Amino acid sequence: MWRPFLKGGNSANPVRPHPPLDRYYRTEEERLRRVRDWFDHSAAHYDWITQALSLGSGHWYRARILRTAGLDRGARVLDVACGTGVLAEAATRQVGPEGFVVGLDPSAGMLSRAQARGVRQLVQATAEAIPFADASFDLVTMGYALRHVADLETVFSEYRRVLRPGGRVLVLEISRPSSRFAYRALELWLGRVVPALSRLGGVKPRELMAYYWETIDRCVPPESIVEALGRVGLERPERRVELGIFSAYLGEA
């Protein structure tokens, strides 16, 4: 079972991943409640929805990018915003019995699904306030959740704090493509088709997927994310992109 440790960030001048989306929330507290509620009530349907969202590429892409990030057997991994545990599960296979993987998420519903998947070490907490000591991990990962945090620099500072010297950050995201044609295709798929399919799981999954697309569409440019990684002291910050939309952000402690 997981242990709760829920606490928000406290940056006076947050670097937000996207501007406030007023039609969904009016205050930061309302945003936190609503996003957590969406994820709690969508957990049972989330895997098949995200498989559709990623066009079935999710599992193999996660496994390959973990290898690219240098994940070795025996490593200590923290998967932030672990959701249903897909990335944590892939990391567990790669680190073997000599290593360990901890999944962290603010949603109790998502943690229940991760536990059912076999992720053994779980904690209920936010990315802005990670309840682990300094220099605890070799790799900190986050899969497709950066757009849901309150402050990029607070989160990246926490990642740097809990990393051992030489440890790495790996943040996966879907980015708005630069090509007009690719953008229109992605808008149709993620902005219309996926939310419509998500209605099969109920109102909450549909609302979550509609919100998901809006956060992608209005997310800060990739350059801003790379710059935020560097500003908190992470070395060699970079973005690697595939197919124009799958971004992997990396930095080293």
Image (spheres, rainbow, N blue to C red):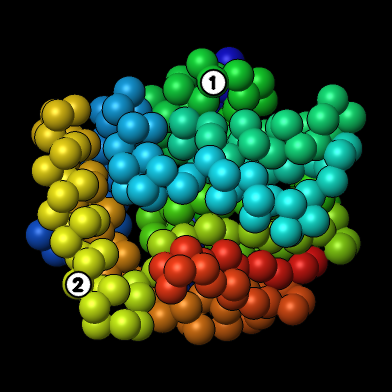
Looking at the picture, does residue 90 appear above or below residue 71? Answer: above
Q: In what element is the residue under mark 1?
A: helix
Q: Which residue is mark 2?
A: 184
Mark 2 surroundings within 10 Å by alpha-carbon count, few (fewer than 14), some (14 through 19), many (20 or more)? few
The answer to whether 49 appears left or right of 207 in the picture is right
**In percent of the image, x 59 and y 72: which residue is there?**
240
Q: The residue under label 2 is which amino acid type?
A: Arg
In the image, 237 versus 133, the foreground residue is 237
Looking at the picture, does residue 227 appear above or below residue 50? Answer: below
Split into 4 quadrants, where in the image is the C terminus?
Answer: bottom right
In the image, 129 versus 47, the foreground residue is 47
The answer to whether 17 appears left or right of 185 in the picture is right
Q: The residue under label 1 is which amino acid type?
A: Arg
Mark 1 surroundings within 10 Å by alpha-carbon count, few (fewer than 14), some (14 through 19), many (20 or more)? some
Q: Nearer the viewer, mark 1 or mark 2?
A: 2
**In percent of the image, x 86 and y 39: which residue is there?**
73
Residue 218 x %, y %: 27, 72
The answer to the question of whether label 1 and label 2 lie on touching residues, with beta carbons closer than 8 A, is no
Split into 4 quadrants, where in the image is the N terminus?
Answer: top right
Q: Which residue is mark 1?
A: 117
Spatial CA distance of label 1 from label 2 is 35 Å
Q: Is residue 163 visible?
A: no
**In percent of the image, x 62 and y 31: which residue is there?**
89
Residue 191 x %, y %: 18, 58
Q: Is residue 93 visible?
A: yes
